[in-house]
Image: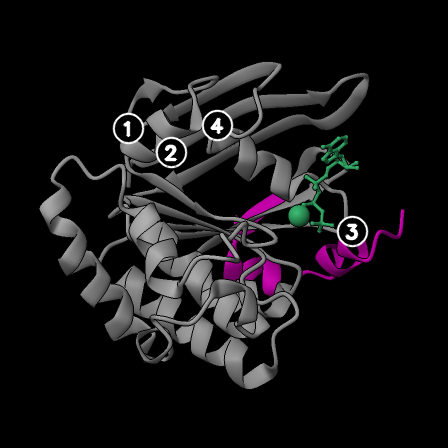
Amino acid sequence: MSAVLSVQHLAVRYGDLVGVADISIAVPAGSVVALLGANGAGKTTTLNAIAGLVPPAAGRIAWQGRDIAGRPAHAIVAQGLALSPEGWRLFVQQSVEQNLRLGATVLADRSRAAAMLERVYALFPRLAERRRQRAGTLSGGERQMLALGRALMSDPQLLMLDEPSLGLAPAVVERMYEALVQLNETGLPLLLAEQSVELALELADYAYVLQTGRTVLEGPAEELAGNTEVQRIYMGIA
Ligand SMILES: Nc1ncnc2c1ncn2[C@@H]1O[C@H](COP(=O)(O)OP(=O)(O)OP(=O)(O)O)[C@@H](O)[C@H]1O
Ligand SMILES: [Mg+2]
């Protein structure tokens, strides 16, 4: 299958510090791709660079054949790439529904926002119940659902998720992953950064292992699941 997203030799610098040194990944149409790696490996930096939140210092980011590297975040969302970010970045004083509606501001046809809202509420009934609650008073799991819901409001053609299971109770993680399976079954490709290797490899078709800003290992998820090297790299044991 052809890749909808292709990242080649991406480098990102934070001043003198190296965020990522050399990352190459591809996301085939309709697939789930996981980025694995220990703390500081470069997962968030990679997703943020694709989303236009940090500028690449080098490399190519091609979305449906077009180079989008260095384009501003709002332009990238408008092209169909959405990110559910690490730390959620919610407007805590605003209600659940106001946060969701903000995710729809890039829709060319604003009248579709109502339909998108219904889709998010169908996926996460918990958010529908709490539509008037301030985002700052939501539980961790509910915030994660809201961050994902807000990303969906832009009606993306690729959904990127940064640590969707982080800090959540097992039952909530399970619900979150069920939602991701449901979304992928509609044909939506997912690019997922995840600390939980086991969980990620269960959902993913293909995975990349990052180590200190480089892709050091890749393969079909079922192959990596049985690979002891993955655990070793992941644990940061040199
Ligand atoms: N704003 C920043 N300024 C300076 N260095 C940064 C910044 N953000 C990230 N880094 C550095 O870039 C490297 C990659 O960090 P990144 O957050 O991408 O890793 P990660 O794989 O997402 O880690 P984690 O699993 O802890 O979320 C790290 O060395 C980190 O310290
Ligand atoms: Mg991270």
Residue highlighted by disc 1:
64
Camera-near label (4 vs 3) is: 4
> Can you give x and y, in whole percent of width and height, for residue 151 in the image?
37, 51
> Can you give x and y, in whole percent of width and height, for residue 220 in the image?
49, 54
Are dots 2 and 1 in contact, CB under 8 Å? yes
**Distance from the alpha carbon under mark 4 to that under mark 3:** 28 Å
Secondary element under disc 1, as helix, strand or loop, is: loop
Secondary element under disc 4, as helix, strand or loop, is: loop
> Above or below — where is 138 with respect to 43?
below
Residue shown at the point (39%, 20%) measured from the top left:
68
> Can you give x and y, in whole percent of width and height, for residue 116 in the image?
20, 57
Residue shown at the point (27%, 40%) measured from the top left:
105
> Above or below — where is 123 with respect to 190?
below
Q: What amino acid type should be assigned to the residue bearing mark 4?
A: Gly
Which badge, 1 or 3, is on the more N-terminal residue?
1
Residue highlighted by disc 3:
233
How packed is label 3: few (under 14 Cα within 10 Å), some, or many (20 or more)?
Answer: some
**Distance from the alpha carbon under mark 2 to that under mark 4:** 14 Å
**Distance from the alpha carbon under mark 2 to that under mark 1:** 6 Å
Q: Residue 5 got which mark?
A: 2
How packed is label 4: few (under 14 Cα within 10 Å), some, or many (20 or more)?
Answer: many
Q: What amino acid type should be assigned to the residue bearing mark 2?
A: Leu
Q: Nearer the viewer, residue 79 or 206?
A: 79
